[in-house]
């Protein structure tokens, strides 16, 4: 029997290769920010601002990763705590692959965050627990709590 490569196997192989590359990146390697937020917005389906509007939406490049309220690493989200309504947080992507932090209800969207970059994200003003995911890797999910 000849083995067949299905679309699922091909995607898994690609994701595994990306993860392997990010694991072998030296800690001292320079990190690159997106060339422009316009390119990021186009890659993110034309994000146009709103409650989740960030400086990156205005054409400012994402800043290198230095610390975060939410960290993306190992294709998983790590949320640092509970936040205030309307608080601006830092989302840092410590992976080599790009990710997003996108609310299930559409109340916030970071746009694409390239590997090694950080963006500022303004949270909703209504208290509650919000489910979110990575629009690029939908199996990545988590929640964030906004206290009232």
Image (spheres, grey):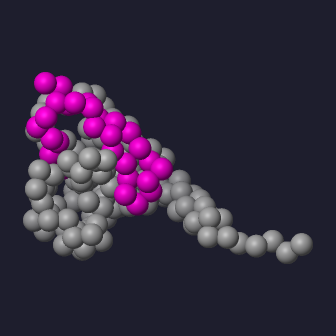
Q: Residue at x 22, y 44 (%)?
A: 90
The residue positioned 89% from the left and 72% from the top of the image is 1
Nearer-the-camera pick, 74 or 131: 131
Instruction: Say above or below: 132 vs 97.
Output: above
The residue sitting at 81% across, 71% down in the picture is 3
Is 139 on the left or on the right of 131, as rendered? right
Residue 100 to residue 77: above or below? below
- Please state if 6 lies on the left or on the right of 38 as rendered: right
Q: Point out the residue furthest to the right here.
A: 1
Residue 65 shows in this picture: no
The magenta span reads 120-148
Nearest the viewer among 131 and 13 is 131
Residue 23 picture location, percent across and down: 53, 53
The extreme front residue here reads 105
**Residue 56 visible in image:** yes
Q: Residue 124, how many percent across, how many down?
A: 15, 41
Placement of 9 over or under 90, stated as above or below: below
- Per the image, is 88 magenta? no
**Which part of the image, by quadrant, shows the C terminus?**
top left
Q: Is residue 136 magenta?
A: yes
Residue drawn at (55%, 61%) of the image: 15
Left/right of residue 102 with respect to residue 16 in the rendered view? left
Residue 74 % position (x, y): 48, 47
Residue 56 vertical placement versus 92 (above, below) = below
């Amino acid at each position: 029997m000849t083995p067949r490569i299905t679309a699922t196997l091909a995607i898994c192989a690609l994701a595994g290769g990306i993860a392997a590359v990010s694991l072998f990146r030296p800690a001292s390697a320079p990190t690159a920010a997106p060339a422009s937020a316009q390119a990021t917005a186009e890659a993110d389906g034309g994000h146009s601002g709103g409650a989740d509007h960030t400086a990156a939406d205005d054409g400012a490049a994402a800043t290198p990763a230095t610390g975060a309220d939410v960290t993306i690493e190992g294709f998983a989200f790590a949320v640092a705590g509970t936040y205030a309504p309307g608080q601006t947080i830092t989302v840092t992507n410590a992976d080599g692959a790009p990710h997003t932090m996108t609310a299930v209800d559409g109340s916030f969207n970071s746009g694409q965050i390239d590997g090694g970059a950080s963006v500022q994200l303004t949270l909703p003003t209504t208290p509650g627990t919000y489910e979110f995911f990575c629009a690029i890797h939908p199996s990545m999910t988590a929640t964030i709590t906004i206290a009232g």
